[in-house]
Amino acid sequence: MKKRIYGVILVLCMIALVLSACGGNNSGTTPTSTTPAESTAAASTAAEKTPAGPPAELKVMCTAFGAIPTDLQKVVDEINKIAIAEINVKIELMPISISAYQEQARLMLSAKETLDLFLTGTLGRFDYVGEISRGQLTPLDELVDKYGDNIKTVLGKYLDASRFQGKLYGLTTMRDLSGSNALYFSKDLVDKYKYDLSTIKKWQDIEPLLADIKKNEPNVLPFTTARTPEVAYSFSGIDNLGTTWGLGLEDITKPVVSCYYFGQKWLDNVKVLHDWYKKGYIPSDIATATTFGPDYLKAGRAFVFSGGSKPAEATQYEKQSGKKVYTVVIDKNMATTDSTLRFLWAIPSHSKNPEAAMKFLNLMYGSEKVINLFQWGIEGTHYVKNPDGSIKYPDGKDATNVGYALNANWLWGDQLKEYIFEGDSLTFPEDMRKYNESADLSVGMGFIFDPNPVKTEIAGITNLVKQYAPALQNGQADPAKVLPEFQSKLKAAGIEKCVAEAQKQFDAWLASKK
Amino acid sequence: MAQISLAGHSVTKSKKKSNFKRYIPYFIMLLPGAIYLIINNYMPMIGLVIAFKNINFSIGIFKSPWVGLDNFKFLFSTSDAWLVTRNTLLYNGIFLITSNVIPIALAIFLSIIANKKLLKLYQSVILLPYLISYVVVSYLVYAFLNSDMGFLNKVVLPAFGGQPVNWYNESKYWFFLLPLMNIWKTAGYQCIIYLASIVGIDKEYYEAAELDGVNSWQQITKITLPLIRPTIIILVLLGIGRIFYSDFGLFYQVPMDAGVLYPATNVIDTYVYRALLQLGDFGMSSAAGFYQSIVGFILILTTNFIVRKISPDEAMF
């Protein structure tokens, strides 16, 4: 009898345990401390200054590079003060670490969890085209016309860059909207050996310097890269139209697409790099490298590394490595699909508050106050102003303990309205504007390839590219032996069909722009 | 007469009823697990239709258009696709053998150890690798195999007078490295299961054998192995059911996703992951999962059928 009672009690405890575990899962996956807000229906849809009624509540998701700041909620509260006063909208910001972002975005979209505004784009971590083809994004044309005046002013001609088949689904931000390459030299080593950097006109010109360093400094890796290396491609001046399987415009003024793995420009670069690899100028594990130029520089082991060329990129590397660099810009910057559409703000199709989301976006693009709150935090707490207009950390604080640092100055609508940090050039906004305006516009800027008609072939080609391209791109593999194998496998997998499809879409897109 | 038979009838009936009553607590204990299985494993089976559709979330899963077998094409279209199928089967075949032979041997050794403390120590040490995530393991391996500074290239090979090898650049070594790592990681787990089985064998068998003058090797082959046969069959059957699945950590993380090594390290799971990472196509990834599970399902049914023909008691169902 006693045993029976114990048995029943045990069973009841187990059931209670299971039920409590089920209940606890409803708290969702938000990393911030606030509870998810229910989005109330937008009480007023008219575009008035201060509508009556409770503020519409929005959930906004963005990327975080590094830890989530401790003072995030304080800053969001300040932003909300302005947002409620001007447009009667309140936001909850959810920064997700970049490495988990893709998974999180996919889950939230397919589960239709509360989300009103989020980051997407053509960068590898995002899935702009996929989301459009799955019907997960709201078309934005009408919303921008009605509520997006600031956005139109800030973006100008770049507003149309993110159109897909004529419709607008995402909005880019005003930042470095073009890109090119630069070489960053370790100041210490250049001064030590008294190299003359004015003779460097093309990237191949650094070869004698690499040879010299290899001879005299055995512990230094002569040539590295600032981020995941695709060296042969980056130095070739080809526009990859935002794709990752070898499609590109060999010449950015001509509307002819091809697979650049079969082309001459890429091959020339590969040959040079392989030569350097054999001579030992390139680290032997570069294809799988997880350490990059600035980190090597920090350890005193780097001589030159390649990177992008936007204004103030050098200071970024100097902050990261703690050492000084000399910059040599190698080629003219290009505005391409990749550079303009890397980051896009979009509204999910299941959002209950698309008008409020667009109003908030409009506020962010136009308000210097809001932009700087997002980027730098609260004045006085996270930064203080200098007499010349620049800003610096308050006394006793630095980059590690300031309490708020999202490190994403290119996300908040208009980077040119951000305050300049002490040490950076005060003419940065002008520099950036000139940089973007002087860019060579690729004829393919704004073209987004839709892979759905050839997705079977793309699936196979992607695997091949991942197998062969990294080793070839970085000089590790011998092009004479490996490239023919790569090319024949690509042909067998249907690369010609994909290129033909891309050309077809490209021609149609060009025709529709006229 | 009628009365007696009536009485007999009611006795058997009430016997059945009280039997069922006795088992009610067990059914209640079964309930949470059964509910979990139904919600987590059976209800989502409806989603299998995604493998045959071109999914558009704004009109919902069930209204999305059917595309027949289109989503399955990429699994068979390139020569690579057949290569990865071959790799998957090859590795899983090797793993199936090593994951049973070696743990059984280990379990037999462990069962002989008399010292309780030492036994617990050995068990924990053997099990430990199973608990370490492959992400961590991949960095440990990197510390060994790094071509510049790795332990093998800097310390071990020079000690034997050998040349440093660029491990991440040559795919042929990985045909040995991967099974080696798999054994290191999973042997402990399988060993514990087998050990539990062996410990349950009645000691009297061994004592009787000793009295009869049977040596150790014969004891193992004639007593231990036959008596753990049910366990072996179940574990092998489960292994066969997973023959198209691979441990993603082992084949993706440990080789650091190095393209050059793909001929040796690309398996169905990694192939699908790489193919669809950019495309993000749910239909195709569902098709891949469907393909893997259907094959496993057919293989399990077939193997079980064969086992049932040979010795009906030991079949799983």
Image (spheres, grey):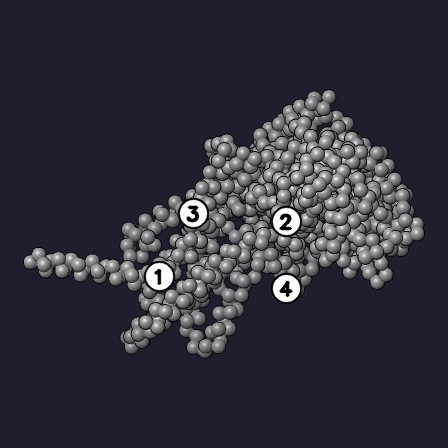
Image coordinates for residue A97, horizontal then vertical, percent = 67, 51
Question: How far apart are the alpha carbons under marks 2 and 3?
Answer: 33 Å
Q: Nearer the viewer, residue B104 or A273?
A: B104
Foreground label between 1 and 2 = 2
Foreground label between 2 and 3 = 2
Q: Answer yes or no: do the residues labelled 3 and 1 have beta carbons within 8 Å?
A: no
Question: How far apart are the alpha carbons under marks 4 and 1?
Answer: 58 Å
Q: Is residue A216 visible?
A: no
Disc 4 or 1, which lies upstream in sequence? Answer: 1
To the question of a shared chain for discs 2 and 4, the answer is no
Disc 1 is attached to a residue of which chain? Answer: B
Q: Which mark is residue A37?
A: 2
Q: Answer yes or no: do the residues labelled 2 and 3 have beta carbons within 8 Å?
A: no
Residue at 35% across, 47% down: B302
Q: Which mark is residue B26?
A: 1
Q: Name the image quarter holding the N terminus of chain B.
A: bottom left
Residue at 75% across, 28% down: A443
To the question of a shared chain for discs 3 and 4, the answer is yes
Q: Is residue A142 above or below residue B88?
A: above
Tell me the amino acid under the disc marked 1. Answer: Tyr
Image coordinates for residue A312, horizontal then vertical, percent = 84, 46
* Pointer 3 local density, CA inside 10 Å: few below 14, some 14–19, many at least 20: few
Q: Which residue is mark 4?
A: B156
Q: Which residue is mark 3?
A: B42
Q: Answer yes or no: do the residues labelled 1 and 2 have beta carbons within 8 Å?
A: no
Foreground label between 3 and 1 = 1
Residue at 59% across, 34% down: A135
Disc 3 is attached to a residue of which chain? Answer: B
* Pointer 4 local density, CA inside 10 Å: few below 14, some 14–19, many at least 20: some
